[in-house]
Image (cartoon, helix red, strand yellow):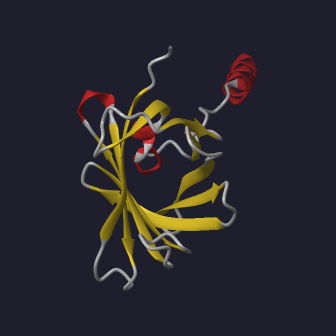
């Protein structure tokens, strides 16, 4: 009888111990492919690395499932994006909404040293033509990030650089 009581107490104690929590749904390494871009940034064109053109705040949100950008250029109202990894397609997606109106959808994945996203963007060409925009985000030395934008008016057969930015950690003041 005593052994039955002990077994019941043991069973109750074992069932009272909570099971370990499962890992968060967006904790895998594929969700971290753009984490190097998270931060507060001062943004400079690669061609003129002393000319500040924008500030940008990049945040990891929603339990690590999304990266949100707030692009704040010095010359106009700016825009923002929301990016995330979709495990069902094994692809990254980004939605960009700028102050000029319209929405642009990008899709892509990791490349050596970073992440590349491509999408169709109206009037994004060097002469205002419609076509593909390809953005490559690369981690640089010194904590900096490069965002290299290219345009293709021939469905990706050829590409021309349309923007090339270096993001450096923001220095207050």
Q: Is residue 20 visible?
A: yes
Q: Percent position (x, y) of residue 141?
A: 23, 33
Please state if 26 lies on the left or on the right of 45 as rendered: right
Closest to the observer, 8 or 125: 125
Q: Position of residue 71 (x, y in %)?
A: 57, 43
Side (left or right) of 80 relative to 169: right
Q: Is residue 79 above or below residue 102?
A: above
| Rendered position, 117 above or below 4 | below
Residue at 43% x, 39% y is 37
Q: Position of residue 123 (x, y in %)?
A: 54, 73
Q: Is residue 95 above or below residue 73?
A: below
The N terminus: image quadrant = top right
Q: Which residue occupies the foreground of this view, 24 or 166?
A: 166
Q: Is residue 90 visible?
A: no
Tag count: 0
Q: Is residue 3 left or right of residue 71?
A: right
Query: Residue at coordinates 61% horizontally, 46% vertically from top-left?
Result: 76
Residue 4 at x, y = what percent?
Answer: 73, 24
- Foreground pick, 108 / 126: 126
Q: Residue sitting at 63 percent across and 56 percent down?
A: 98
- At x 32% / y 29%, what residue is drawn? 143
Vertical side of 33 occupied by 98: above or below: below
């Amino acid at each position: 009888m005593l052994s039955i009581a002990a077994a019941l107490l043991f069973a109750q104690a074992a069932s009272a111990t909570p099971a370990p929590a499962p890992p968060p749904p967006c904790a895998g390494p594929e969700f971290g492919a753009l984490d190097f871009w998270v931060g507060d940034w001062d943004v400079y064109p690669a061609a003129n690395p002393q000319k500040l053109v924008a500030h940008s705040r990049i945040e990891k949100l929603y339990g690590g499932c999304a990266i949100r950008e707030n692009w704040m250029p010095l010359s106009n109202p700016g825009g923002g994006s929301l990016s995330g990894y979709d495990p069902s397609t094994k692809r990254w997606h980004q939605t960009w909404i700028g102050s000029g109106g319209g929405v642009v959808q990008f899709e892509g994945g990791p490349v050596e040293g970073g992440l590349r996203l491509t999408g169709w963007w109206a009037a994004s060409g060097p002469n205002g033509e419609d076509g593909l925009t390809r953005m490559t985000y690369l981690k640089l030395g010194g904590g900096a990030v490069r965002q290299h934008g290219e345009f293709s008016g021939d469905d990706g057969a050829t590409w021309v650089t349309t923007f090339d930015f270096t993001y450096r950690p923001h220095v207050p003041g």
